[in-house]
């Protein structure tokens, strides 16, 4: 990792606060999606079997991994980050999956990369679940929509900054380092 000067700003994400928001977003999404499905289907069925519980757990794990992979894809597509500079993993101490890079990205690029998984693992499965009338898929979509609460929190803070400012993700903590473009002209 390259040595950088002191950042102009540091954005720390409060994980307990994000966890509470995640629960609220998940519950609101779940109720809204199931109610919408109920209006579409007229006679919705909600049966919980051992098989649906197993499918749900497998689906949730798969979608969490896919969520993080879409962050990496966003880093590549929007930030031009080389694949070899990306890391995906689980921080067992914090209880979160993560995707990160030590490369600088513009604020605009990282904001897009933050929201890409919300659309691909939350909204798209919700639409497919409504189309198929599949409550299992709707429940998974609600969890992944709520699971994007940390991404939303970072996005909210980054929206306050100019698009061309440079951002570096912390590889271990839910923290972003913010640099003015002129501060890093020799580091790009």
Image (cartoon, grey):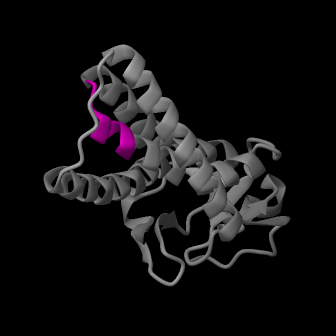
The percent position of residue 86, horizontal first and vertical second, equals 43, 65
Q: Is residue 182 above or below residue 175?
A: above
The percent position of residue 137, horizontal first and vertical second, equals 30, 39
Q: Is 134 in the magenta?
A: yes
The image quadrant of residue 83 is: bottom left
Secondary structure of the magenta portion, mostly? helix
Q: Is residue 47 above or below residue 3?
A: above
Q: Please state the extent of the stretch shown in magenta in the rendering.
A: 133-140
The percent position of residue 163, horizontal first and vertical second, equals 74, 41
Report the side of 182 relative to 123 (left or right): right
Can see residue 43?
yes
Viewport quadrant of the N terminus: bottom right
The percent position of residue 120, horizontal first and vertical second, equals 40, 38
Name the outermost residue toward the right: 8
Q: Between residues 108 and 53, which one lies in front from this camera angle?
A: 53
Q: Is residue 24 above or below residue 35?
A: below
Q: Between residues 135 and 9, which one lies in front from this camera angle?
A: 135
Q: Is residue 185 above or below residue 134?
A: below
Name the outermost residue toward the left: 51
Report the side of 39 relative to 25 (left or right): left
Viewport quadrant of the C terminus: bottom right
- Residue depicted at x 57% and y 55%: 23
Q: Is 54 in the magenta?
A: no
Can see residue 176?
no
């Amino acid at each position: 990792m390259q040595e950088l000067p002191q950042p102009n700003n540091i954005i720390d994400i409060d994980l307990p606060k994000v966890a509470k928001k995640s629960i609220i977003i998940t519950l609101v999404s779940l109720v809204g999606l199931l109610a919408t499905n109920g209006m579409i289907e007229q006679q919705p069925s909600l049966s919980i079997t051992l098989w649906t519980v197993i499918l749900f757990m497998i689906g949730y794990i798969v979608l969490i991994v896919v969520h993080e992979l879409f962050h990496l894809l966003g880093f590549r597509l929007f930030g031009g980050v080389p694949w070899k500079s990306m890391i995906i993993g689980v921080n067992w101490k914090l209880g979160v999956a993560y995707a990160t890079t030590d490369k600088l990205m513009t604020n605009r690029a990282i904001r897009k990369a933050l929201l890409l998984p919300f659309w691909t693992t939350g909204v798209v499965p919700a639409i497919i679940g409504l189309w198929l009338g599949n409550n299992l898929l709707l429940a998974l979509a609600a969890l992944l929509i709520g699971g994007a609460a940390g991404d939303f929190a970072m996005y909210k803070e980054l929206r306050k900054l100019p698009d061309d400012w440079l951002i570096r993700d912390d590889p271990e903590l839910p923290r972003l380092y913010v640099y003015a473009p002129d501060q890093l002209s020799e580091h790009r």
